[in-house]
Amino acid sequence: MIDLHMHTSRCGHAEGTLEAYVAAARAAGIATIAFTDHLPLPAEILARDPHAAEYAMPEEQLDAYVADVLAVRALSAASGGPEVLLGIEADLHPGNESHVRRLLERHPLDIVLGSVHFVDGWAFDDPDRRDGYSDWDVRALWERYFDDLIAAAQTGLANVIGHADLVKKFGYVPEGDLAPLYERAASAFAAAGVVVEVNTAGLRKPCAELYPSAGFLRALRAADVHVTTGSDAHTPAEVGAGLAEAREALLAAGYDRVTIFRNRIGEEISL
Ligand code: ZN
Ligand code: FE
Ligand code: FE
Ligand code: ZN
């Protein structure tokens, strides 16, 4: 299996060095990993939310992050693996495209995850910001989140859409049929040519299921959207966590391949 989503202590809310993650992946027998620390946030988000300093590395550390991942990649290759890819998880919300583009274009990235963690500047996945859910009708929130997620895919900035139904994290799920929402997103992702990750972090959160859900995954398969897998580890012990469940869910949805990215070019490998 491949684990193309993990964070290190550099992002301000995860634990562990690059070396510790590589050692954990080697011990777990994972062939390929991608480091995907959070891309530095734009000034307007940092000014608006005092927590935001702990959501991502500061901009002045981005060059050091890239250099450190490239160094650990060489070290890992010389010590029997795993293969280490240079990735980033970029926040894609309306108005953030030029900030993201400016930061991405300077670096030799293998993979860019595009994620929506903010709606109208509200970090809806921060456990300390859960009070924000009381301002929303859940159905309206989901519609708005999916609009922003589709727009994120359409920017062309991301290879992979991260944790595609993250809005369910704390268990706020609308009543009624969600299939039309999933089908709308799936056809937009197919048209945009983005891959979707099966992210196992949801198994460790109140929602207690993979991102995306089984129903969403079926809609993605029906639209021929390609997929990859990631643990979204925030400690070395979480590297590879849940990948067996991800594989089962993919097989059940009819997938037999996952996509890996090198130099931002996708290649399908057998699951
Ligand atoms: Zn994180
Ligand atoms: Fe994320
Ligand atoms: Fe992440
Ligand atoms: Zn994440």
Image: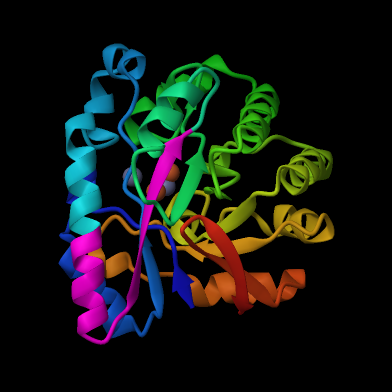
Q: Residue at x 40, y 38 (%)?
A: 104
Q: Residue at x 36, y 52 (%)?
A: 36
Q: Quadrant of residue 68?
A: bottom left
Note whether 270 is above or below 164 in the view shown: below
Which x, y percent locates residue 59? 23, 30
Counting every numbered tag in the picture gives 0
Which x, y percent locates residue 87? 38, 53
On the picture, is 177 further left or further right than 202? Answer: right
Magenta segment includes 28: no
Q: Quadrant of residue 246?
A: bottom right
On the picture, is 198 further left or further right than 37? Answer: right
Whether residue 23 can be seen here: no
Magenta segment includes 73: yes
Considering depth in this image, is 56 or 193 the residue closer to the camera? Answer: 193
Considering depth in this image, is 258 or 53 the residue closer to the camera? Answer: 258
Q: Residue at x 26, y 87 (%)?
A: 80
Which x, y percent locates residue 64? 17, 46
Considering depth in this image, is 85 or 136 the residue closer to the camera? Answer: 85
Q: How is the image coloured?
A: rainbow
Q: Residue at x 82, y 54 (%)?
A: 223
On the picture, is 269 further left or further right than 240? Answer: right
On the picture, is 185 further left or further right than 271? Answer: right
Whether residue 86 can be seen here: yes
Q: Quadrant of the C terminus?
A: bottom right
Note whether 49 is above or below 201 in the view shown: above
Note whether 86 is above or below 63 in the view shown: below
Note whether 227 is above or below 114 in the view shown: below
Which x, y percent locates residue 99? 41, 24
Query: What's the magenta region?
Result: 70-91
